[in-house]
């Protein structure tokens, strides 16, 4: 029985908080869904969420703006490489023109039969807006930024992962998660993420034995994890047990992320996957519905550290 239905979110370690906010809300026209802080460790770091106005699962991109002296990430192989979002068919040219006009170098390419606008986040992480005729989600519009329904991002299309051992990754994706293998050719491998609503979402895998090993630490300029949606706790725990039972023992216990619950598993090549489901209160747990993403909020267990965390965070206006 399938225990995954689409993506839940994608998460990166970026650089400056303000440039990150401007990139997603102004250049790409996504909406601020939540502004909070990293729940792990002791270093004060923002955790920013972007997506549809209501923060629908499968539209969410999250970032840790990790501008810390002496801490750097290295992009390479055995690591997630590209963030992909879905756009309407015919919209790639609009995005190439829009991004280039804003000083973000972009070009149109075709891979696995789909036209894409290819560009990079200011911190260097590769992004693609993929034209998809298999996506029934309404486009995310943003009148203030000049993005209408003909061109708006619909949500997550997927991500690409670079590996040195394609067989081990193939087994992990098709047996452990499990996803459906759709393509295997000179361009790479494509795996379909099951989705109860029939929305096309994918993991693309490329073989890269030439690049250096990418880092897995929380550091700017790298993708941290790809989160799949289990829908509820029962499915999450069943999938966790299935994965661990296959011998993939590098899998975490459940972690409380305030708005959702998570388990993390390291794939054979190193790319980190998350199994997540949204709690009933979701994003409205600490902000009124319709007002999410407007203020900086802290989880209850950080109440005694709020002043310390605020003082240590990078200055940003989020405007």
Image: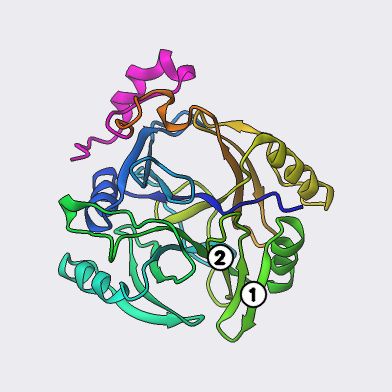
Q: Badge 1, how many Cα within 10 Å: few under 14, some, many 20+?
A: few
Q: Residue 202 carries which label?
A: 2
Residue shown at the point (73%, 38%) measured from the top left: 237
Relative to 190, 138 lies left or right: left
Residue shown at the point (23%, 35%) measured from the top left: 315
Q: Which colour scheme is used?
A: rainbow
Relative to 176, 223 lies left or right: left
Range drawn in magenta: 293-319
Q: Badge 2, how many Cα within 10 Å: few under 14, some, many 20+?
A: many
Q: What is the quadrant of residue 31 in the picture? A: top left
Relative to 190, 112 lies left or right: left
Q: Name the residue carrying label 1.
A: 182
Q: In this figure, what is the number of numbered marks?
A: 2
Relative to 147, 245 lies left or right: right
Q: Measuring from the top left, give residue 143's x and y in whole percent.
A: 18, 52
Inspect the magenta stretch and tell me whether residue 243 lies in it: no
Q: Which of 285 and 297 is in front in this view?
A: 285
Label 2 near label 1: C-beta < 8 Å? yes
Quick check: 11 above or below 99? above
Quick check: 313 above or below 10? above
Residue shown at the point (40%, 17%) measured from the top left: 305
Q: Residue furthest bottom?
A: 186
Q: What is the quadrant of residue 314 in the picture? A: top left
Residue shown at the point (66%, 48%) measured from the top left: 265
Q: The C terminus appears in which quarter of the rendering?
A: top left
How far apart in space, not on screen, are marks 1 and 2 (Cα)? 9 Å
Q: Measuring from the top left, give residue 90's x and y in whole percent.
A: 32, 76
Q: What is the quadrant of residue 203 in the picture? A: bottom right
Inspect the magenta stretch and tell me whether residue 302 lies in it: yes
Q: Tag 1, which secondary structure?
A: strand
């Amino acid at each position: 029985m399938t225990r995954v239905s689409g993506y839940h979110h994608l998460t990166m370690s970026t650089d400056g908080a303000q440039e990150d906010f401007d990139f997603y809300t102004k250049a790409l026209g996504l909406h601020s869904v939540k502004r909070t802080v990293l729940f792990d460790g002791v270093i004060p770091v923002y955790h920013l969420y972007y997506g549809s106005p209501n923060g629908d699962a499968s539209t969410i991109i999250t970032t840790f703006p990790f501008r810390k002296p002496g801490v750097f990430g290295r992009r390479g192989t055995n690591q997630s490489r590209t963030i992909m979002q879905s756009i309407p068919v015919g919209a790639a040219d609009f995005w190439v023109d829009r991004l280039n006009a804003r000083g973000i170098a972009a070009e149109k390419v075709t891979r696995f039969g789909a036209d894409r606008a290819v560009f990079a986040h200011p911190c260097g992480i590769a992004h693609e807006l993929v034209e998809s005729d298999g996506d029934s989600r309404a486009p995310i519009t943003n009148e203030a930024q000049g993005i209408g329904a003909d061109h708006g991002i619909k949500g997550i299309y997927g991500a690409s992962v670079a590996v040195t051992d394609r067989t081990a990754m193939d087994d992990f994706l098709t047996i452990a998660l499990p996803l459906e293998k759709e393509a295997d050719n000179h361009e790479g491998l494509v795996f379909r993420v099951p989705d109860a609503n029939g929305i096309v979402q994918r993991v693309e895998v490329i073989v890269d034995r030439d690049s250096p090993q990418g880092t897995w630490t929380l550091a700017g300029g790298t993708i941290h994890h790809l989160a799949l949606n289990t829908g509820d706790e029962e499915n999450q725990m069943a999938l966790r047990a299935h994965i661990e039972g296959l011998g993939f023992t590098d899998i975490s216990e459940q972690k409380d992320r305030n708005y959702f619950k998570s388990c993390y598993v390291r794939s054979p090549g190193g790319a980190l996957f998350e199994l997540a489901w949204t709690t009933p209160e979701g994003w409205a747990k600490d902000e009124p519905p319709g007002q999410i993403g407007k203020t900086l909020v802290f989880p209850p267990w950080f109440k005694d550290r709020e002043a310390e965390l605020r003082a240590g965070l990078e200055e940003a206006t989020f405007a």
